[in-house]
Amino acid sequence: MASRSVSGRVYDAAANEGIAGVLVSNGDAIVQTDTGGHYSLAIDPNLDRYVFVTVPAGYRPQERFYALLHGEPTSESFDFPLIPAPERARDSFRLAHLSDTHVVLDDSGAVSQAVLARDLDEYVGNLAPDLAVVTGDLTNMGTVPELESYRAAIESVSIPVFSVFGGHDGNIERRSQDGDTPCTRNFEATLGPTYYSFDWGGYHFVIYATEDNYFTAAGRARKERWLWADLALQPRHRKSVLLLHISPDADLLKRFQENNGALVLHGHWHSSRVFTMGETIVASAASACFGGIDTRPRGCRVVSFSPAGIQTDLHAGGPGTGLSRIAGEQASSRPSGSAPNSVEVGEDTFSLAWQHNLESPLHRAAPVGFKDKVLVSLQSEQLPGRNGVTSLNAQSGEEQWHYPTGSSIKNRVEVVSKGHNPADQESNDWCAALTVAGELHLIAMATGKREWTTELPAHPLRWVYSAPAHNGGYIIAGSKAGYGAYDIATGDRKWHFAPADGDEWPSYICPQVYNEELCIVPVQRRGFLALSMKEGAIVWEQDLPVEYFCASPVLAGDLVVVSSASPHTGASLTGGLQGDLVVLEARTGKVVAHYAQALPGYATGIAVANDRIYAATAAGTVHCFDLHSGGPVWQFQSGEDLLDMTPYKRGIRSLLAAPMPLNGSVLVGGCDGWLSVLDQTTGTCTDRAYFGAPLTASPGLTPDGFCVGTYGGSLCAYRIER
């Protein structure tokens, strides 16, 4: 079919005057309106489905910003009336970034149209954004009824909601089509183009689809040409915001940065991460309607734009919890609350020694007590924010030093000590900290000064949620996309082992060093491997079903206790897999015992003491087993979660922190906000203390007691009364 042209006018509907300089596109070529608001655009009926305009700041479409091309005439005319909207021209405004809503129409998931509508109403009502964007995987399968249900939900709120195409929104088409066929037609029929742009305030926003497998070869080339042409046409003073589903790769991020890119917002990982590359901010949001893969609570990221720049922070969902604002900038105004005055552990009373309010929540990073210090990993998820490591005096709770990092530290620090005399002024004591973006830092314990910093391969695009480990000479750091051994003295990398191409999905499972010879690492959907500390070669491998949500392995003498998820009939990643416990010989990997489906849900944290295994689960239970026989000894059930943090779930009971044996008892921090003290022998709850916020990190031991950190950002130290 021969090409033809379309023409029309973009105009102010209130004044009936044309608007000059507006971008008009067919998804490939871009033209600008003349002084009267007129445009003419050549189109190819075989390729072009839409004509759309970049709505300028200070306007909104009277109906739609796009027109669907159809029919056979040699020319068509499409006018775009725009309504003045002064609120869209303000220099200061707020955007709510939501992602991965996965709307379904049946009982296969947590999110229906009604649930999404309620959550959107909650976020809009509590946070007062001017606009919202949902960065992909709007639905679970991308059927037209699912997409229509999603559309009805976003149209129920009072602010405009912009939607990004994600792979799940084309799944049903991809499954039913072969060859070079687009898998975006359901999305387009319901929500419009999969890529376009608009202006708001002083910023240019670009909605863009990076799921190339859902486009034809010609479609991929067209959308890429459009993207860079659109950005190149922006005036030099106007910065751009790129809205994606999948996080940008290095090439896309570099080119966007070169085109005055200020901010990238994306989803896909069901996890939170924020970092800067040059002057470009890259940020993701946890899942909007259920717990994230990284166990961040359902919620959204709020981005504030002003003449001073861009600020962003996370907000947890859940009205009435008192925890919806968790950003670092709120720390000074957040009420500290009253921590319990004492906790009875066995025959001893531990009294509150001090309470320190941090500038970020303690999520899964347990505080680490060492000599006169308590070391805390900070993960504000805010920009600007306070990330890094803070050292507090173990006796008074006063800050001794703070070591800043460019991105958050998702897990605990690792203490590296060569000093054997407690009075040696810590000259040989360090701590190793690993950022989510893939920076490894060695910090002098006495001063908080940097010894060295090194970047892991693919920094800053990593998703590292694990803690480092060491054997006295080398630090092991990394995750699924690669583990490395780094010389403690210099930071030089000795070897690198990469079991997978990427870190998908983020996991808190940490490597363990056995006898300074082997490093035991998990590899999701492969099993557990032991690597030689000398050269990184595989010494043994045990094929076990390991997923991102499994607990870290725990050494028990010459044994290692690991958890896995049983692939039994009917299980699904979103349905709470039954948990296995497996005991291996640490030196050989030989299976000593396999306790199949020992747990009602997968293990989230494990501890071993006195020949007993203590396992916390995603079902909110703690189970005690005999280490050698696997026989169940007792179990305990926690209360209802304060925030929806367990992956894919909401409104349940769950545990995330590993139990901590102490003084003949087991301390269990719960997502219900309670610290429960259980008798190691019977499982009887002998004392409980309420902290008012989820306890998602294990307590940390100190020389004369322990510390409890909350998701609300409080660190409470308890000291034994003699």
Image (cartoon, rainbow, N blue to C red):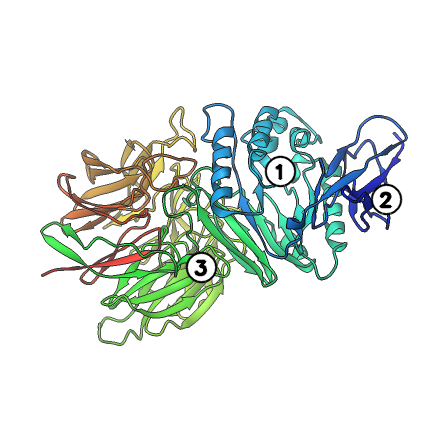
Drawn side of residue 610 relative to residue 61, left or right = left
Q: Position of residue 607 (x, y in %)?
A: 25, 46
Drawn side of residue 224 relative to residue 270, left or right = right
Q: Position of residue 33 (x, y in %)?
A: 83, 47
Q: Is residue 233 above or below residue 291?
A: below
Which of the two discs, 1 and 2, sits closer to the camera?
2
Residue pointed to by mark 1:
165
Residue 434 in view = yes
Residue at the location (57% across, 44% down)? 132
Tell me the distance, in whole angstroms, between the alpha carbons under discs 3 and 2.
47 Å
Tell me the distance, in whole angstroms, between the alpha carbons under discs 1 and 2.
30 Å
Residue pointed to by mark 3:
329
Q: Is residue 235 above or below residue 187?
A: below
**Residue 38: assigned label:** 2
Drawn side of residue 7 relative to residue 268, left or right = right
Q: Secondary structure at mark 3?
A: helix
Q: Quadrant of residue 548?
A: top left
Looking at the image, do the residues carrying marks 3 and 1 touch, with CB atoms under 8 Å apart?
Answer: no
Position of the N terminus, as image quadrant, is: top right
Q: Earlier in the sequence, mark 3 or mark 2?
A: 2
Residue at the location (12% across, 55% down)? 349
**Residue 302: assigned label:** none
Question: Could you classify mark 3 by the number of other residues whose Cα lies within 10 Å: few (under 14), some (14-19), or many (20 or more)?
Answer: some
Count numbered badges in the picture: 3
Q: Position of residue 703 (x, y in %)?
A: 20, 63
> Looking at the picture, which amino acid does disc 1 mark?
Phe
Which of the two discs, 3 and 1, sits closer to the camera?
3
Q: Secondary structure at mark 1?
A: loop
Q: Earlier in the sequence, mark 1 or mark 2?
A: 2
> Looking at the picture, which amino acid does disc 2 mark?
His
Q: Earlier in the sequence, mark 3 or mark 1?
A: 1
